[in-house]
Amino acid sequence: MAFLNISGLRKRYGALEILKGIDLELEKGGFLVLVGPSGCGKSTLLNTIAGLETITEGDIRVEDRSIADLHPSKRDIAMVFQSYALYPNMTVSGNIAFGMEMRGVPAEERKQAIDKVAKVLQIGHLLDRKPSQLSGGQRQRVAMGRALVRDPKLFLFDEPLSNLDAKLRVDMRTEIKRLHQTTGKTIVYVTHDQIEAMTLATKIAVMKEGIVQQFGTPAEIYNNPANMFVADFMGSPAMNLLSGKILKGSNGLAVSLERAAGEAMKLPIAPGMASLAAYADRDVIFGIRPEALTDPEGADRNARSVAENDCLIEVVEPAGSDTFAVTKLGGKEVVARLRADARIKAGETARLAFNLDKAVFFDPQTQIRIA
Ligand SMILES: Nc1ncnc2c1ncn2[C@@H]1O[C@H](COP(=O)(O)OP(=O)(O)OP(=O)(O)O)[C@@H](O)[C@H]1O
Ligand SMILES: [Mg+2]
């Protein structure tokens, strides 16, 4: 039995169903990230775990015991909110110790707990300051400290980094990862940032409109997206999703992609994707990530099926460590990720290598992955 088990969970406000049957589980010490666009129900799901929202149907179990009817204070769960309201008149140590004080924890014990948490979060030098004398990232760490001193069974984070600027977000992301590694705590974390999800999670649940679209490890979600929504949502720049047609020839299967001018491009389909034979002469959506579409010198040497083609480059975007190039295929703009020093010019033709081991295919009607 998993440490946290959510089964058949539904949440309705009157006739409006916000969570439409959620099934998830998390092992002890795991880091579950709930990711999805605004309004998909991430916070609502987190709040039902915390007990801040009731559930309409289904169950939430921690260590095989239902917590659905437990008062929030009895759940042994600590939550860090997006707006980490600290008490402005109290010092950092006062803020961290407040809950313990309320529970009548003796002063010496409080001090030890504060020192321990301050060390983990590296805020020892800030303990006597007031929140107004702290940076955003430091305040965020104090808010985490407040949750951490409680040493609960389960931590819930609701977009804790969304108030921070880009650089600080990245730093704090590393801090949270370190915190998880050193404490081994079980965490459920909400974000709409797919990079945060990929870097922090041991398990990701990608949500859309109150439904979990896919639940798996970051690698599973990235490499084997269950449908077009997941493929498009996870990864930056996003996966190229192009209209194509499956052709069956004497040399096996191929996918044909319309070019802006001239004959369609035909890419051989890797032998492992025989299931696509059922789609012969039919339209499909061909998915290829920018990093699987490179200059030939930059192509993955371990790839078994790579096809090179000349493509008219419309835009070149140097990004420091890589260069992105835009071409057009299947009636859409396609982003290729080249080495920084790849010689390429807008308006000219360049040879691009398609790593077809990494290609994925979707049914255009159902949007579900077919190979
Ligand atoms: N008390 C309520 N009554 C009715 N609808 C609500 C209530 N609370 C939330 N909702 C709706 O439920 C949906 C999910 O909201 P929720 O806050 O869980 O989304 P979210 O995924 O956390 O979004 P965000 O990324 O913007 O924080 C939204 O459409 C919201 O308007
Ligand atoms: Mg939210």
Image (cartoon, rainbow, N blue to C red):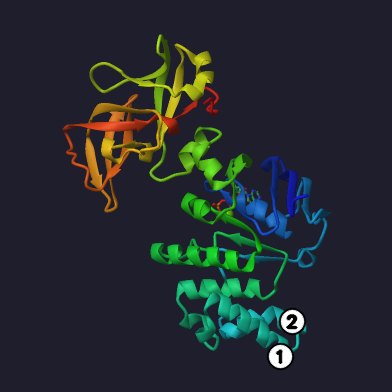
Q: Which mark is residue 108?
A: 1
SS under mark 1: helix
Contact (CB < 8 A) between labels 2 and 1? no
| Residue 171 horizontal side relative to residue 119, left or right | left
SS under mark 2: helix
Whether residue 192 is visible to the viewer of this picture, yes or no, is no
Farthest top residue?
250
Judge by depth and name the residue closer to the eye, 327 or 75: 327
Q: Name the mark nearer the viewer: 2 or 1.
A: 1
Occupied quadrant, residue 349: top left
| Residue 1 horizontal side relative to residue 127, left or right | right
Q: Residue type at mark 2?
A: Met
Instruction: Identify the residue at horizontal 60%, vertical 84% (top origin).
Output: 93
Whether residue 21 is visible to the viewer of this picture, yes or no, is yes
Q: Residues within 10 Å of mark 2 (few under 14, many from 20)?
A: few
Q: In the image, residue 88 lies at what x, y percent?
A: 56, 81
Mark 2 or 1, nearer chain start: 2
Q: In the image, residue 299 lies at what x, y percent?
A: 33, 38
Residue assigned mark 2:
102
Judge by depth and name the residue closer to the eye, 52 or 300: 300
Question: Relative to 302, is 39 above or below?
Answer: below
Instruction: Identify the residue at horizontal 66%, vertical 51% (top origin).
Output: 45
Q: In the image, residue 140 lies at what x, y percent?
A: 53, 71
Instruction: Identify the residue at horizontal 52%, vertical 26% (top origin).
Output: 371
Instruction: Identify the residue at horizontal 54%, vertical 66% (top origin).
Output: 178
